């Protein structure tokens, strides 16, 4: 099969195969490490196992639901609820957008409430790490503005 290829090409194909296998093995090792760390974190109570569960409990639940035949029922109900939620959210969001587009008065009246709801929703899902990063970035912006103000004052003095 490889007789028609040059030695350089054969070597290239060999290196590509080795690289492909190394990438696959690396991915498997990383995924295994993530699941192992997740399991350890739940067992050691570093994370709340009730909220984050753990891989062993998920596997046991899937096995038990498969044995009693209810796995497909639960999966079907979840898919159905997801579709209903997506469609109803899309329709409702589109209707609200149309009303706000048609009525400038309604848009102006509801604007602070819509901003508050979207801001609250974003903050409700903010982890402590995200909060710390956001606060540090805001502090950095304030610091830059402060230095820009002093630079502007100095440049006026030099003129």
Image: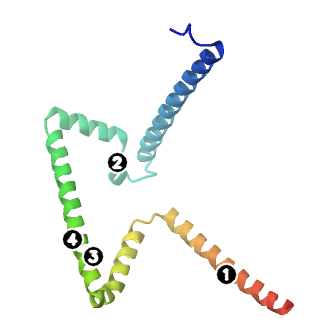
Circle 1 is placed at which residue position?
145
Q: Nearer the viewer, mark 3 or mark 4?
A: 3
Residue 54 image offset from top left, x and y in percent: 36, 44
Residue placed most toward the observer, 33 or 19? 19
Label at residue 92: 4
Residue at the image point whose x is 64% and y is 73% from the top: 140
Q: Which of marks 1 and 4 is nearer the N terminus?
A: 4
SS state under label 1: helix
Residue 76 percent coordinates (x, y): 16, 46
Do the CB atoms of the residues marked 3 and 2 lie less than 8 Å apart? no
Q: Distance between the residues labelled 1 and 4?
A: 41 Å
Judged by depth in the image, the label closer to the viewer, 1 or 4, is: 4
Picture quadrant of residue 157: bottom right
Of the image marks 2 and 1, the number of the one nearer the N terminus: 2
Between 101 and 57, the residue placed more toward the observer is 101
> Residue placed at 27% from the left, 36% from the top?
60
Residue under the image location 34 percent in, 54 percent down:
51
Alpha-carbon neighbours of circle 1 within 10 Å: few (<14), some, or many (≥20)? few
Give the residue number, with chain letter if any, for mark 3. 97
Q: Give the Cα distance between marks 3 and 4.
A: 9 Å
Please name whichever residue, 134 or 141, is drawn nearer the observer in this view of the structure.
141
Element marked by disc 4: helix
């Amino acid at each position: 099969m490889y007789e028609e290829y040059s030695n350089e090409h054969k070597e290239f194909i060999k290196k590509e195969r080795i690289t492909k296998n190394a990438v696959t093995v690396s991915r498997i090792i990383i995924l295994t490490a993530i699941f192992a760390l997740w399991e350890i974190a739940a067992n050691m109570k570093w994370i709340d196992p009730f909220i984050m569960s753990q891989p062993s409990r998920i596997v046991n639940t899937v096995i038990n639901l498969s044995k009693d035949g209810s796995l497909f029922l639960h999966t079907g109900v979840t898919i159905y609820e997801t579709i209903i939620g997506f469609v109803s959210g899309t329709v409702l969001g589109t209707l609200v957008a149309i009303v706000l587009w048609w009525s400038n008065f309604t848009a102006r009246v509801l604007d602070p409430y819509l901003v508050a709801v979207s801001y609250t929703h974003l903050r409700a899902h903010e982890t402590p790490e995200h909060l710390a990063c956001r606060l540090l970035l805001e502090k950095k912006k304030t610091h830059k503005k402060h230095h820009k103000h002093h630079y502007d004052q100095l440049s006026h003095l030099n003129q």
